[in-house]
Amino acid sequence: MHMGRAQAISPAAYDAAVFQIGTDVEGVTVSSQLAGLFLADKLDVSDHYNADSVDCTVLASLLNAAPQAAKPELVVFVHGVAAPAQFMDASHFEVSSDVGFSDLVKQTTEKFPEWLKDNNQVVNLSSEVQLIAPSPPTALVHKFETISDEIEALWPDLKAQLEDFLPESKANGYSVRSVVKHISDTLFADELTQLNRIQNAVTDPSTKLIVDLKSLLSVGTKTGFGSLTYSACQQIIAQVISQKLGQFLVTVVALPVELGISQQNNQGQEALLAKRDAKNLVSSPFINANAPFTKRDAKNVFVHTKRDGRSASMGYSTEESCQVATANCNNHGICTQIGATWTCVCAPSFNSTINKTTSWAGAACEKKDVSVEFNLFLWTGVGFLTLFVAGVKMLATVGSEPLPGVLEAATIKKST
């Protein structure tokens, strides 16, 4: 079904794409406001909106084209997509990059669940998945209660299955499928495991799921948004959604890389402001100076923890989990079994271009080891300082030594 454009906007201004699996809608461009109304209707909260300011003809056409089967609704936001309109091989309409677009995700993931609480239970299965249902399926809730402890064990088998979602072709001389073996982004593994958990887990048509995926931003930031690894991860997410979640009425909102980077920058600025505010609070007269602060508290404040709560300095139960969590020790070492756990043993790297060897340290070999240079600089400085002090003392003592007796007598002034 082809429909006229809602707005005359050049393709360069397209900011996102909304995919409706099982429909035939092409050639439509809408504002973020209309896209929000579309999602509101899909999730049964359209009564909270006033549609007077939008083209209801276009909205009605989009809603009428959507599948009407008695299935649970699934809305998936995928952040960090390089070319949103090409993300999936499915019918879609495009969303223009207007001012209000950045609020689309927030209103869907925060406001909509609040409005649905009157007749439903809202369960945050994880930071990525929200379940909204009159009676949440206990089996799915239980699956997510234990998922953080099982990801490391489940990921190797799931990763082996993901190769089937990629073409048997080569790019830059490398097999596209072979890239899967080297995917080590923890967030990507986490999100794919969660998508696998919701497969065939919901049957009640009144149930709704909202999923917010951000691992493509993580992969792209680490490997580059033009890398083969990023491209493979993007294809895998698209294929898993379209092929493995057929029990849902699936709506996918592909969000551009630029939006994700902008949000990351804003979050970074907010973090700096929060850090500054926290620093200012230390000297605030409203802080209870007598509040106890134990050694245990201090230890907990400064321990760096991973996303699943495990300390980064702790070992891992298997070699595979060590490789996944540390990105193969950031290619600066090897996961080695020490006692009952696996940890990174760092190895120096040699740059033949500048003829320099670099040593690495840290729980994931992520830090440059400058201990040799530091010790060399420190003790060399100490040595020079010692020599300088000794020289000054020697010069001072030379001028204060007593003269020989004969010379001392000759210098005595005779009285007349």
Image: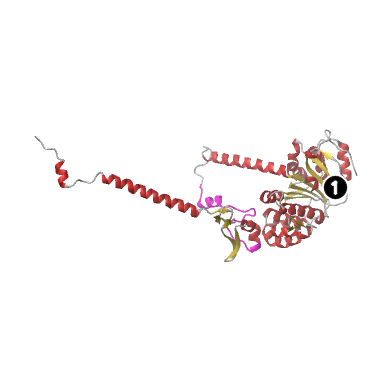
Give the magenta range.
292-320
Q: Residue at x 78, y 55 (%)?
A: 240
Does any portion of residue 151 appear in the rendered image? yes
Q: Position of residue 43 (x, y in %)?
A: 81, 45
Q: Residue at x 88, y 45 (%)?
A: 65
Colouring scheme applied when the structure was drawn: secondary structure
Does any portion of residue 142 appear in the rendered image? no
Where's the N terminus, which quadrant?
top right
Q: Position of residue 364 (x, y in %)?
A: 59, 56
Which residue occupies the foreground of this view, 105 or 260? 260
Q: Position of residue 152 (x, y in %)?
A: 67, 60
Q: Position of residue 21 (x, y in %)?
A: 84, 50
Question: Is 230 a magenta residue?
Answer: no
Left or right of residue 223, residue 239 in this image: right
- For the view shown, which residue lies furthest in the right direction? 1
Which residue occupies the foreground of this view, 355 or 60? 355
Q: In the rendered structure, which amino acid carries the disc numbered 1?
A: Ser
Q: Which residue is mark 1?
A: 91
Q: Residue at x 58, y 42 (%)?
A: 275
Question: Is 300 a magenta residue?
Answer: yes
- Vertical comparison of 280 with 177: above or below: above
- For the view shown, which residue lies furthest in the top direction? 53
Where's the C terminus, which quadrant?
top left
Which residue occupies the foreground of this view, 29 or 37? 29
- For the view shown, which residue lies furthest in the left direction? 416
Q: Dot 1: what SS?
A: loop
Which residue occupies the foreground of this view, 44 or 14? 14
Left or right of residue 367, residue 402 in this image: left
Which of the 4 quarters of the picture holds residue 46?
A: top right
